[in-house]
Image (tube, rainbow, N blue to C red):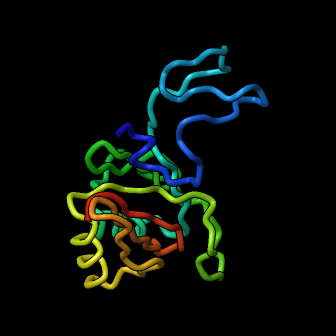
Amino acid sequence: MNNIGRLLAVGLTIGTMVVAGCRSVSMTGKDDIMTTTNVRDLNALAVYVTNLDRSVEFYGKHLGFKKGEDMEPGVLMSAGSVTLYLEASRKSKRTEVAPTAEFSPCFATDSVKASYEALKAAGVRIVSPYSEFAPTFALFRIADPDGNLIEFAGKP
């Protein structure tokens, strides 16, 4: 699975999409029309936070991300082939986690169930409980300290 498939769960059906109002374009590499540009990878996923130190601790302690280069106003963090850019530019908002998110990264782990149990035991806020949809697919969602939704999906 490519980085986009591992990182993003945005409600799109991967397969075809509309580009700049044109006909749909195959995402299997068999494009039959010219596209404006061709994305080949995901450099980093920006996560906007209110407290950079608190978020660096959360993503490091609970999700295994390692702090990398400082890049004002934020910092790069990585785990496996995933790179996040935590940017301290979001103003605090006092709302509950919305039923739908602006975005929700979807991370893969060795065991979705083991990750769920570990994060729950650590007191991380669970937004959607662990659910198995097939013997080979399960998911759950958590929220970071700023309410950003994070999904874990894959093998139970």
Is 66 located above or below residue 26 in the figure?
below
Residue beneath the point at 36% across and 56% down: 107
- State the residue in front, 69 or 132: 132
Residue beneath the point at 48% across and 47% down: 45
Residue beneath the point at 45% across and 37% down: 42
Q: Position of residue 103 (x, y in %)?
A: 57, 57
Q: Position of residue 55 (x, y in %)?
A: 42, 67
Residue 139 occupies quadrant: bottom left
Along the horizontal axis of the image, is 68 left or right of 11?
left
Is 40 located above or below residue 54 in the figure?
above
Q: Position of residue 46 (x, y in %)?
A: 51, 50
Along the horizontal axis of the image, is 146 left or right of 90?
left
Quadrant where the C terminus lies?
bottom left
Is 83 located above or below residue 86 in the figure?
above
Along the horizontal axis of the image, is 127 left or right of 32?
left
Residue beneath the point at 22% across and 63% down: 111
- State the residue in front, 50 or 103: 103
